[in-house]
Image (tube, grey):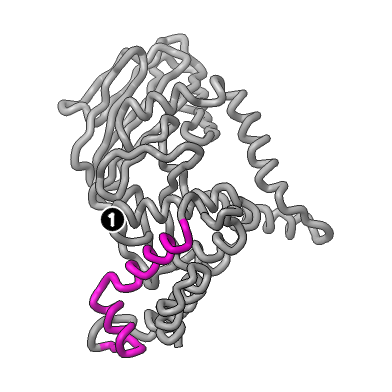
Amino acid sequence: DHRDLHSFPTRRSCDLDLTYNGDNSNAFVIDLHHRDVLLSGKIMLRDGMLVGWRESSAWNPDQHLHFAIRGDADLSNILFNEDSTSAIVNLPEETQCLELQVAISGVDIQGAINNLNAAEYKTFDEARQGADSTWEAALGKLMVEGGTKEQKRCFYTALYHCMTSPYLWSDADGRYRGHDNQIHTVDPGREVYTVFSLWDTYRALHPLLTQIEPERTVDFVYTAMKNYEQGGELPMWELASHETHCMIGYHAVPMMLEAYNYLHEEDGTLAGYTPKQLLDAMVATSNRTEAHRAYGTQGYLSSELDNESVSKTLEYAYDDWCIAQMAEIAGDTATARTYWIRSQ
């Protein structure tokens, strides 16, 4: 039905503007079956808002998403399917333009409502102006001189891509779903993130973010340690409170070491953790599987024991070199020696 659609995201919500083509049967659809396998879900009307949840299975086999939607028109004329997992929201006849504000939460419906109520902007135009200012400040952290317009466009497009993940995961009230599938609350001043594709990002993206996004980088380390406390390992390829174990290596280690070297506090802590606590999480993660332990014992990973053995050996060796450095910082010379040898 719509002729035009624009959207602008803020930290925990998104503002949408829909312009319709002039007839009197304008509507929009919510379909919880879209994209991956729906395990359970429901759409409801509550206090003039559309709220609900979907639990789905894909790469993360148990992904939880809750939502709250409000608009500047009456949203109560709804045609549901038999189990309320999809709905057609019919708009008043005079509606030609519609503004919607959508918020999500990994915790519960109330978390999504709280995120919606905490939205910094209340109208689409405010959100558009706010998004412009936010991205101008973010991209303005690096200033380029010389070059052509196309080269600058390429550079700043790449920088924009560098700031699209990891994603903010904790709610406005500080709650988040942890790796034990329980609901936790962040410590004061901290936030939790998700989507750590660390094999893809530890070489270049995280070193860049350590320099230009230091506050978020400290929260990345905080998040990694919460993953360890709740799930027994640092993130490898984490998605919405689930460890997918995709790709190879244990590359939270170099991300955390570099963050420590640049961003630790005067008392020697980082994100509230001592070097010994960071080291313990690194060591436990490096010995998590039989393949890890065999590599550590014999100095390489054999193809008889695991696939991608050469690549994994190289990745483990680099990560162990980083663990040795963290051990030196922590004053643990025995562990430092063990991991210096492993890294060879």
The span picked out in magenta is: 274-303
Where 180 falls versus 9 (above or below)? below
Where 58 falls versus 292 (above or below)? above
Rendered location of residue 269, percent (x, y): 52, 55
Residue at (54, 53) in percent of width and height: 217
Q: Quadrant of the N terminus?
A: top left
Observer able to see residue 230: yes
User: Is residue 296 inside the magenta stretch?
Assistant: yes
For the residue pair 141 and 253, the one nearer the viewer reads as 253
Observer able to see residue 209: no
State the predominant SS element of the stretch in magenta: helix
Which element is circle 1 on? Answer: helix
Where 69 falls versus 312 (above or below)? above
**How many numbered marks have been drawn onto this rendered protein structure?**
1
Where 185 falls versus 143 (above or below)? above
Residue at (45, 73) in percent of width and height: 332
Q: Quadrant of the C terminus?
A: bottom left
Rendered location of residue 341, percent (x, y): 43, 87
Q: Which residue lies under the disc numbered 1?
A: 231
| Residue type indicated by callout 1 | Gly
Rendered location of residue 198, percent (x, y): 44, 63
Rendered location of residue 78, percent (x, y): 29, 18
Residue at (47, 34) in percent of width and height: 12
Dot 1, crowdedness within 10 Å: few (<14), some or many (≥20)? some
Quadrant position of residue 249: bottom left
Residue at (66, 35) in percent of width and height: 132
